[in-house]
Image (spheres, grey):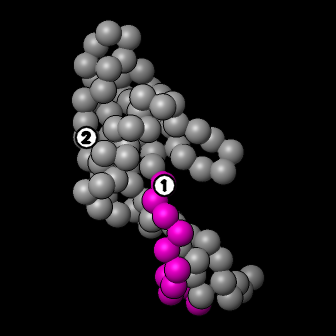
């Protein structure tokens, strides 16, 4: 199947930060993505940033998207990382 245009997200950065989880400081892996409208696989219009966070200590994964939501305390950390990219 051939698509002329579509939405795509590209990872622009990945960082490890400490977060509070049940009273402990644990490491979390935060990935920053940029969302684009593409035409023939060429990114044309940037639509914004999306974040994902993985906490290996408790095996939790959150991703920002249309149906999913990152908890507010983790979203602030993700936005802080997103300012770097």
> Which residue, given by chain and number where applicable, does mark 1 sit on?
50
How packed mark 1 is, by other alpha carbons closer than 10 Å (few <14, some 14-19, many 20 or more), is some
Rendered-image quadrant of the N terminus: bottom right
Left or right of 65, for residue 35: left
> Which residue, given by chain and number where applicable, does mark 2 sit on?
16
Q: In this view, does 8 lie above or below 66?
A: below
* Residue 16 percent location from the top left of the image: 25, 40
Residue 54 visible somewhere in the drawing: no
Q: Is residue 10 above or below residue 78?
A: below
Q: In this view, does 52 lie above or below 8?
A: above
Residue 19's label in the rendered image is none
- Magenta: main secondary structure: strand
What span is in magenta? 40-50
Rendered-image quadrant of the C terminus: bottom left
Left or right of 35, for residue 15: left
Q: Is residue 12 above or below residue 51?
A: below
State the SS at label 2: strand
Q: Residue at x 61, y 72 (%)?
A: 7
Does the magenta-highlighted stretch encompass residue 15? no
* Residue 20 percent location from the top left of the image: 32, 20
Q: Which residue is drawn at 52% across and 43% down?
A: 63
Left or right of 75, for residue 6: right
């Amino acid at each position: 199947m051939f698509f002329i245009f579509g939405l795509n997200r590209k990872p622009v950065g990945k960082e490890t930060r400490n977060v509070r989880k049940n009273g402990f400081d644990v490491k979390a892996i935060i990935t920053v993505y940029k969302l684009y409208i593409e035409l023939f696989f060429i990114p044309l219009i940037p639509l914004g940033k999306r974040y994902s966070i993985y906490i290996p200590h408790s095996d939790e994964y959150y991703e920002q998207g249309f149906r999913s939501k990152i908890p507010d305390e983790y979203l602030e950390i993700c936005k802080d990382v997103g300012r770097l990219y």
